Amino acid sequence: MKRSLLLLALVAFVWACATSTKQEEKQNSTPINYQALGDSITNIAQKTFLGALMKVLSQKGTVEAINFCNLHALSLADSLSRQYQCTIQRLSDRYRNPADRPDANDSTILAEFHATKAMGKLPEPRLVTTSDQVIYYKPIVIGMPTCLQCHGNPTSDIAPATLAVIREKYPQDKAVEYQQGDLRGMWKITFRKN
Ligand code: HEC
């Protein structure tokens, strides 16, 4: 009798320990901060991308630089994607590369970004959570005159040789006529939820 009571106490003790560890584990596993993760991924991507662009621009000129404007021309985007198990895109309603065209859900967010921008404010990044994904959106602004060499006015900002290559490579191009400070598009980082 004594023995079985002891056994019962032992079982209860082990069970209590097991459940409390489980609860602790739950509390300790801090949820992923997708907002912060999205911020850092886009900051790294933007910085590296811009650095590479400026280097080619100064060393080889605008026409050569056109080939470097594809995000995936930099292995960086792909290595960040692998590291964080995410997909990195730049989207625009006035896209140059048709692969950067927003889908219906993206377009809703982009329209909100445009509305905020039209009121003179810089839109805040947005998180959208679905059953199996977390999607991070962040505005991209024409932040420096350099952008206009390839996205500005086709007669006054873009050199004829540059324009010719753009038209040849992107016959459906919509990404011109931008001005300094305009909302150019947005980053979209898609995380798969585990
Ligand atoms: C040397 C020319 C050149 C310069 C300078 C340039 N871009 Fe681009 N940009 C391009 C090309 C070409 C593409 C299409 C790339 C591709 O095929 O993925 C592009 C694509 C983009 C896209 C993706 C959406 C789309 O339209 O396909 C964004 C966003 C963008 N550029 C923003 C900028 C910003 C902001 C700057 C200034 C910091 C800038 N670009 C400077 C040539 C340029």
Image (cartoon, rainbow, N blue to C red):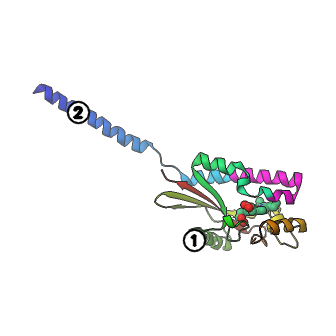
Q: Which three-letter amino acid code belongs to the residue tagged 2?
A: Val
How many labels, in total?
Answer: 2
**Vertical order, 158 against 85 (above or below):** below
The answer to which of 114 and 89 lies nearer the viewer is 89
- Is 7 drawn above or below residue 177 in the view shown? above
Q: Are marks 2 and 1 in contact (CB under 8 Å)?
A: no
Image height check: is 66 above or below 160? above
**Can you give x and y, in whole percent of width and height, for residue 158 in the image?**
86, 68
**Magenta stretch: helix, strand or loop mostly:** helix
Q: Which segment did they paint magenta? A: 44-66
Residue located at (82% from left, 57% from top): 65
Q: Residue at x 78, y 51 (%)?
A: 51
- The magenta stretch spans residue 31: no
Q: What element does badge 2 sit on?
A: helix
Q: In this orientation, does residue 143 appear?
A: no
User: Does residue 57 show up magenta in the picture?
Assistant: yes
Q: Earlier in the sequence, mark 2 or mark 1?
A: 2
x then y, percent, for residue 160: 90, 68
Q: Which residue is mark 2?
A: 11
Residue 35: numbered disc: none
